[in-house]
Amino acid sequence: GDSCNCELQASLDLPANLHSHHLRVLSKAGLIHSRRDKLDGRWVYYAVDRDAAKHWREWFDAFWDTGRMVKRPLCGPEGQNATPIENT
């Protein structure tokens, strides 16, 4: 459901400026949406965009699917001297 700014800030224990920054990033990413109170526009309520959350969960589930993971050597300096790894 909806949560006001003060509830979120209290539960996350972040400085106000950092809290506002993260809410702005999440909002721009489409993960949350906000609305102003109908009676007092100074109050803002935030809620998770459930459709976006479902989409991102499906994406992360596919990303972390162990059946799709492939063993390979590191691409950086450590991987330059590594022997090739066989995929099983």
Image: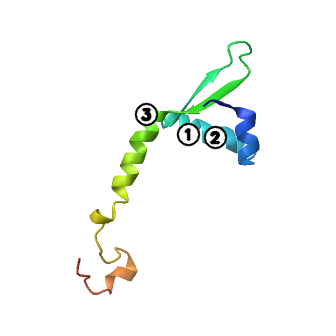
Please tell me whether mark 3 sits on a helix, a strand or a loop. helix
Report the residue marked by disc 3.
51
Other residues around mark 3 within 10 Å, as few (<14) / some (14–19) / many (≥20): few
Answer above or below: position of 49 versus 64. above
Quarter holding the C terminus? bottom left
* Image point (37%, 47%), residue name: 58
Question: By what rule are the colours in the image chosen?
Answer: rainbow
Q: Nearer the viewer, residue 61 or 33?
A: 61
Amino acid marked by disc 3: Asp
Label 3 and label 1: CA atoms lie apart by 17 Å
Q: Position of residue 44 (x, y in %)?
A: 68, 25
Q: Neighbour class for label 2 at 10 Å: few (<14), some, many (≥20)?
A: few
Disc 2 designates what residue? 21
Contact between labelled residues 1 and 3, with CB atoms less than 8 Å apart: no
Q: Are marks 2 and 1 in contact (CB under 8 Å)?
A: yes
> Which of pointers 3 and 2 lies earlier in the amino acid sequence?
2
Q: Amino acid at mark 2?
A: His
The residue pinned by badge 1 equals 25
Question: Secondary structure under badge 2?
Answer: helix
Based on the displayed image, in which of its 4 quarters is residue 83 positioned? bottom left
Q: Is residue 16 visible?
A: no
Residue 11: assigned label: none
Q: Is residue 68 above or below residue 9?
A: below
Comparing 79 with 48, the one in front is 48
| Quadrant of the image containing the N terminus | top right
